[in-house]
Image (cartoon, helix red, strand yellow):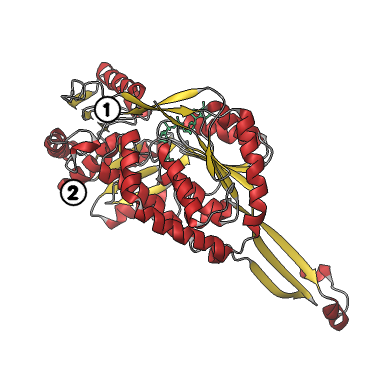
Amino acid sequence: MKEIHHWIDGKEYKGTSGRFSDVYNPATGEVQAKLSLATKDELDAAVASAAKAQVAWGATNPQRRARVMMEFVRLINRDMDVLAETLSSEHGKTFPDAKGDVQRGLEVIEFCIGAPHLLKGEFTDSAGPGIDIYSMRQPLGVVAGITPFNFPAMIPLWKMGPALAAGNAMILKPSERDPSVPLMLAKLLQEAGLPDGVLQVVNGDKGSVDAILDNPVIQAVGFVGSTPIAQYIYERAAQNGKRAQCFGGAKNHMIIMPDADLDQAADALVGAGYGAAGERCMAISVAVPVGDKTADALIERLIPRIEKLKVGPYTAGNDVDYGPVVTKAAKENILRLVQSGVDQGAELVVDGRDFNLQGYEDGFFVGPHLFDRVTPDMDIYKTEIFGPVLSTVRAQSYEEAIQLAIDHEYGNGTAIYTRDGDTARDFASRINIGMVGVNVPIPVPLAYHTFGGWKKSGFGDLNQHGPDAFRFYTRTKTVTARWPSGIKEGGEFNFKAMD
Ligand code: NAD
């Protein structure tokens, strides 16, 4: 059986814990590798070595660091297919989707090439007689990234790009479910010129995460994953005096107004609800048509589109719409929640419960489901299902629809479909959700804007990628300098006069 270990000090490091977790091929249900889980001592040693490597890397001029990012971009493009193929085999998503995963991470690395500009400080000339004030952005030192299974290329790249370009060293703790791509990326970074030890990839589970949270050398933690873990990590990191940004789960609503183009809305809902088997934090999992006429017309359009979806392994080619979910436990959880929806009185208008793929009976495939007449008290409405299940909640007015989204505990993404500018503008302005689409179902901001949710979808300050990421991974130092020649000319500086 293949074993997967760690990447420490620029080489593969064979873990010594003797503890392993299974890495599956979700399409067949087979275990394809064993992942070594690091001990606390191994994690601490990786941190100590990263701290040493960070000193020279932090002192390297930002343009040189940016050149490493530039070469990294070239190498990712060179290896795009093999990265995507490996990603599909461990995650289960289709090959085009896997390429998209790498691509959306790559775009953040492209943005990081602008690090010299983003790291520039501020300067005030002659703030007083002979006095200059300047602020500089300095790296934090050693920082950590803890990432989820559902974007095994994109999210590690979102973490490592800004952290490293800003001059930090990083401990990356990827998901145990699909650990190979982060290790491949670490090797590519070495090839691109990153000094050994500046990026350490340490695989592990809760034990390694707790070791990260308790290690006093680590200054900041960037986490992405489910809400209970995001909240736990935020609290424990804060208790230990670390900077933390922790992004959690989601329940993204799409509001469909009576004036919307319903064919467009139905197409968008199918892509955003079922793409990647619904395993996206920006997936739309709740459709809110306004008025029964809109709801009936929307459901009528959705059913044939959903029934046509092709579910299969990534090896079956580009016409597969989505693949298996990540584990057997994930599949069972989805089907349990579907059953709860039926039991609690929702109308299951597309029933995927009996879905079976010939030749892949042990794979973690889940057929598509569509619920109508879901109400806010039901578990399928309150919980993040993270599977190919779309719930329809009928609202009688725009006010009722927006209030639903406002009242939901998650606040990652949302969308409105309408032709009316006033309604769209009101929605964008009043909604308490981090990312908003107007006739755009999955409003993931591009790399030069920032990504982050509100409410229980995000804990801590500042967002991922864009300028916020550089703020998160640096701290400001402000120097007030008085020069003797200035004092001679202007006399003693009068601080009071500055008030
Ligand atoms: P997860 O919370 O199970 O795991 C995320 C990371 O936390 C992994 O590295 C895992 O090893 C670690 N972890 C798991 N249990 C832990 C514990 N008890 N203590 C300490 N660490 C632990 O999440 P997942 O299932 O890998 O990913 C799916 C979730 O991530 C969904 O909820 C999805 O919405 C969310 N997500 C959010 C965003 C966002 O930007 N808001 C993006 C992608 C995914």
Task: Give the numbered dot on residue 445.
Answer: none
Q: Is residue 17 above or below residue 68?
A: above
Kindly identify the residue that appears in the image at 36 percent across and 21 percent down: 329
Q: Position of residue 192 (x, y in %)?
A: 48, 56
Judge from the rendering whether residue 428 lies leftward or rightward of residue 211; answer left or right: left
- The picture places residue 99, in percent across and down from the top left corner, at 31, 47
> Residue drawn at (35%, 45%), measured in percent from left and top?
83
Q: Earlier in the sequence, mark 1 or mark 2?
A: 2
Horizontal relation, residue 19 to residue 73: left or right: right
Would you say 16 lies left or right of 98 here? Answer: right
- Picture quarter with the C terminus: bottom right
Q: Which residue in the structure is indicated by mark 1?
A: 374
- What amino acid is found at the position of numbered circle 2 in the picture? Gln
Q: Is residue 204 above or below residue 463?
A: above
In the image, residue 191 sits, relative to residue 376, either above or below, namely below
Q: Nearer the viewer, residue 217 or 478?
A: 217
Per the image, the residue denoted by label 2 is 264
Specify the quarter for ligand 1: top left
